[in-house]
Image (cartoon, grey):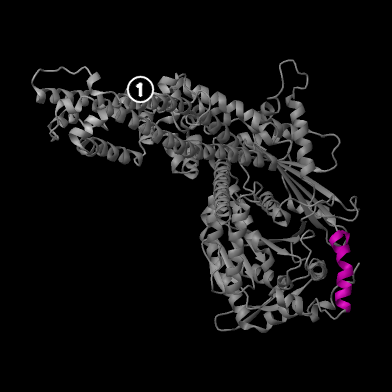
Amino acid sequence: MNVPMNMQQKENGMQHALKRELYKYAARYALEQERHGSQGDGRSSIHYPALFLFVGDLVKPAVSAVHDINQLKWDNEDGVVYVHIGTDDTSNEADAGNASSASSDSNALHPVDAVNEMNSSHNHEKARLGYGAESSYENAQVTYHRLPISTSHSQRSSSKTLRKDVHRRFHESAAALFGLNRMMRRVSNRIAEYGRLYSSFDRIYVTVITRADDPLNVLLPEITKLAETILAQSFKSVQTDLHVLVSEMEQVDSFGYASAAGLAFLRELDYMQSLDYMFSGKLLVTEDGISIPVTHPAAPLFDLVYVLSDKNERGTGVPGGWIENAEIICRICLLKNRKQEESYEDRAAIASTGANTYNNTSFKNNIRTTSDQHGYASAGFAEIRRPNKPIALTVLYHLYRYLLSRMQQEPDWSIKDKMAFFGLDASSVERKVEGLLPSEDLVSGMSGIMTHNRSFAELKPLSLREAERALYGEGAEAYFRENVVRPVQERVRERSSSGLLRRQAEQSHMEYPEIGYFQWAAWSDGEPGSVREALLALIRDKSMQLESARALMEQRQQERVEDQPIKRALFRDKQNVRNLIDCLLERVYEPKVDLLRLENELHLLRIYDTEMEELHRYSRQVTTSLEALERTLNEVAEESIAAADEYIGQNVMEYYGKVTEELIADLEARRGREVWFEDRYMGDMNELAIKGSDRLLARLMEVCRDLLLSAEPLRLSFEEELLQRANVTITYRDRDVLTRDDLFRRLYRTLEDQAVVRIRVFDYTQEHRYEEKYFFGDHDSAFMDYAAHAEETSRIYKLGVVYEERSSGVEKLNLMGGFHLEDLMVYRNGKVYYDSYTENGYELHPAELAEKLSPLR
C-alpha cells in the first residue's frame, strides 16, 4: 500500500510544483506589462517625499503589500521609505517569517493574489523584508524597529491591562524612547538622501497605518508627534494622514477582546481628532539622555483619517480581506501627492474633459461635520484591466495544445513502413538472424569427425538416426551443439538484455523526428493495424513453420539408409560409408541449421515482442505525462480566468484560442512549419519529455514569451481587446453584437459597483455624506473621455480624472467622508463587548487618557 501512496504523493508534488511555476510565469508577464510592457504602460511619480509608518505587529502583512504596489506603480518609488514599529522579539519574527513563507507557498497555487504574491520580485522582496535580531533592522527602504514592550498573544489573552501596560512601559523605558529617536533620525537622514528623486523637498507626506485592535496604537500620539518633530527639522511642512484598518471578518477566536480593544482605540482616536486636542511630552532625547518636550497645539492630530474594513458598505466581505486595502492606501497617497504633468497633451486632455484635480483642503472642509466634531473618510477601489495573467496562461495552453497535436499526428505510413521503423521488416530480421549464426561452414567441417569402423552393409538397413549413432555415437550431436548451437544461444542471450528494439526506435527517430512517443505507444499497443499485431501474427506464422520443420526433420531421420539417393561404388565399402556421411550432413545437419535459424528467429521475435511491451509501457508513461501537462495548463488557465471578474474574464479561452491559432499560422507561413522544433526553440520535444515535465514547461514558457506574447495582436488597448473578446462568439448575423458604447456603459457600471466604499456605515444616507470619485487611465483612452462626461448633468459628487500613461486598464477610486465613528457598524457592534470587558475589570485605556475621553455615543 505504501508504494502507490508514495507514487501519488510524488505526482501531487510534481503537479504542485508545475502549478507554482505557471503562476510565477503569469505573474512575471503581468508585471512586465505593468512596468514596461508592450502596451507602453508608464508609472506615475510622486511630487514630495513620502514616508509610510506602520504601527503594530498585526499590520505587518501590509508592509510588503504597500511596498510592492508602490514599486509597481510609482516611477520614483526607490525614494519612498517604510518604517514598521512593532514589539515582536527575534523568535517571534522568525516564526512570523516562516509562516509568511509558508503562506506565500500556499498562495502561489491560488490564482487570486492581493498584491502580486506570485511574482519572483515580490518573493525576493519578502525575503528582503525579513526582520533581523536587532531592535532595528533596516535596508535602503524598509526599517523594522522593535520596541522592548511585549504584546504576545498569551499576554493579550491573560492581561486585563494590556493597552494600559504598553503605554506605561513605553514611558518608563528610557531605552525604548531613545531607540525610537535614533531610528527616526536615521530614517530622516535617509529620506534626505533621496532629494534628487522628487520635484520638491519642501513637504513630506507621512502615512500612518495601524490595525484598530492592535495594542501598540495606544502610543500613536507619541510615535506620530516624535516622527513629525524629527522630520520637521528637514522639511518645511509635514502632512500626516492615518489609515485605520478594521477587521470584521477575522474575528472568530478572539472576537470579544479584539472588538473591545478596537472600540477603545476608536474612542481615543475621536479624542485625538477633536479640534481642541493638545499633546505635550518629553519625547525628544539627545545622545546625552537629555529630554526635550514636544507639544501639539489645539488641533486634530492627523490631517485626515481613513477607516477601511474587510467588509464593504453593503455588508459583504472583501475578497483578499483587509490586506486588499493596501491598494486604496497607495492610490490615496498618489492622488494627494502626484507629480502633475506639464505637457501640452495633458493640459489639453484635462481641458477637454473638464476633469477636476484632487484638492485636499476642499475635501477636508467638505467632510467636516460640526464645529467640534471631525469627519472621517473611507474609500473604495476598483480596476478593470486586460487580464494579463489569464492571457499568458491561455496562450501558453493553446500553444502547447497545438504542439501536442503535432506530436500526436499519425503519418500516412503502411504497416510495412512501420515495421521497418522498428527494424522488424523481413530483410532486417533476416540480417539479424544471420548475424547470430556462425559465419564459417561448420556443418561441412563435421565430415572430419572421427567415426566408428562400420561397414556400409551394417548401416544399410538402419534409419538415418540409427546410422548416425552407429557411426558417431554422441560425437556428431555434441560437435553441432558445441560449435553451432551454443554460440548462437550466447548471442541470443546477449541480445535479449540489450534493449535492441528501443535503440532501433531511437535511431529511426533521428531519421524521422516526427515519429515519437505517441506513435511508439500507438504502434506497440497490440490493437488492429498496430506493429505489435503484425509482430504477433509473424510469431504465429514462424511458430507454425517451426512445427512443420521439426516434423519434417523427425520424418527424415526415420528414413532408412537404403532408401537414400546415395551413390554406391562396387567393392568400395569405405567410399559408400563416406557417401552416407555426406548424405547425413546434407539431409540432417544442414536442415538442422535451418531449423536452428528458424528457432532463433522465432526466439528473437519473441524477445522483440517482450521489448515492445516494455516500449509500450515506457511510451505510455511519457505520453501520459505529456497529456497530464496539457490538463494542468488548461486547469491553471481556467482557474486564472475564473479568478478574474466574471465580465472582464469572459471569452478569454475562446478569443485567445483564435489569436494563438492565427499567430501560429502566420509564424509558420513566414518561417516554416518546423520553426517550433528548431534547437533554439522547442527542439526535440520527445527528448525534452523524458527529461521531465518541468524542463519541458520551462522551455515552452520561453518559446511562448519570445514568439507569441510579444506579438502585435496582444498589444491592443484594454478597451479594444475587451470589445473584440466580448464579440468573439458572435456570428455575422447575430444581433447581440456589443457596440463600443455598450461596452463603455458596462465598464462604467462595473467600476462603480466594484469601487463600493470599504466600511459599513449604519445609515447609508448619513447626514454629512460627501463623495469624490476619480478615474485613473490613459490620455488617449476613449473610455476615459466617456467616463469624464457620463452622468454629467445628474451626478451629485465631484468627479476627477487622473491621466497616466497606461493602455492596459483603468482604475477608479471612490472617496467618501463626513461620517462619525459612532456611525460605523464596527463601532456599534463593539460597544457591547467594550462595556462587558470594562465591567469585568479590563482597563482598556491609560489612566490619564481615560478621563479625557468623550462618553460612548
Question: Farthest residue in the top direction?
Answer: 733
Badge 1: how crowded within 10 Å, few (<14), some, or many (20+)? Answer: few
Q: Position of residue 372 (x, y in %)?
A: 87, 64
508 on left or right of 162: left
Q: What residue is shown at x 44% (from left), y 41% (from top)?
A: 690
The answer to whether 639 is drawn above or below residue 13 in the figure is: above
Q: Is residue 683 above or below residue 26?
A: above
Name the dominant secondary structure of the magenta segment: helix
Q: Please give the name of the residue rendered at 63% of the width and 75% of the height, measured from the top-left corner.
A: 147
Q: Position of residue 464 (x, y in %)?
A: 25, 27
Taking the magenta stretch, the answer to whether it contains residue 115 is no
Quarter occupied by the N terminus:
bottom right
In the image, what residue occupies the spot 71% across and 32% down?
783
| Residue 231 rendering spot, x and y as whole percentages | 61, 66
Q: Quadrant of residue 733?
A: top right
Q: Is residue 837 magenta?
A: yes
Residue 172 is situated, as x and y percent measured from the top left of the image, at 67, 84
Q: Which residues are magenta?
A: 822-839
Q: In the image, 265: left or right of 61?
A: right
Q: Nearer the viewer, residue 736 or 576?
A: 576
Amino acid at circle 1: Ala
Whether residue 506 is visible = no
Residue 179 vs residue 444, the one in the foreground: 444
User: Is residue 727 in view from this perspective?
Assistant: yes
Instruction: Write down the quadrant of residue 386 in the picture.
Output: top right
Q: Tag count in the figure?
A: 1
Quarter of the image where one finds residue 84:
bottom right
Image quadrant occupied by the C terminus = bottom right
**Residue at image mark 1:** 426
Describe the element under mark 1 as helix, strand or loop: helix
**Horizontal side, residue 461 vs residue 98: left or right:** left
Task: Work out whether residue 574 or residue 611 is closer to the camera in this orientation and state it.
Answer: 574
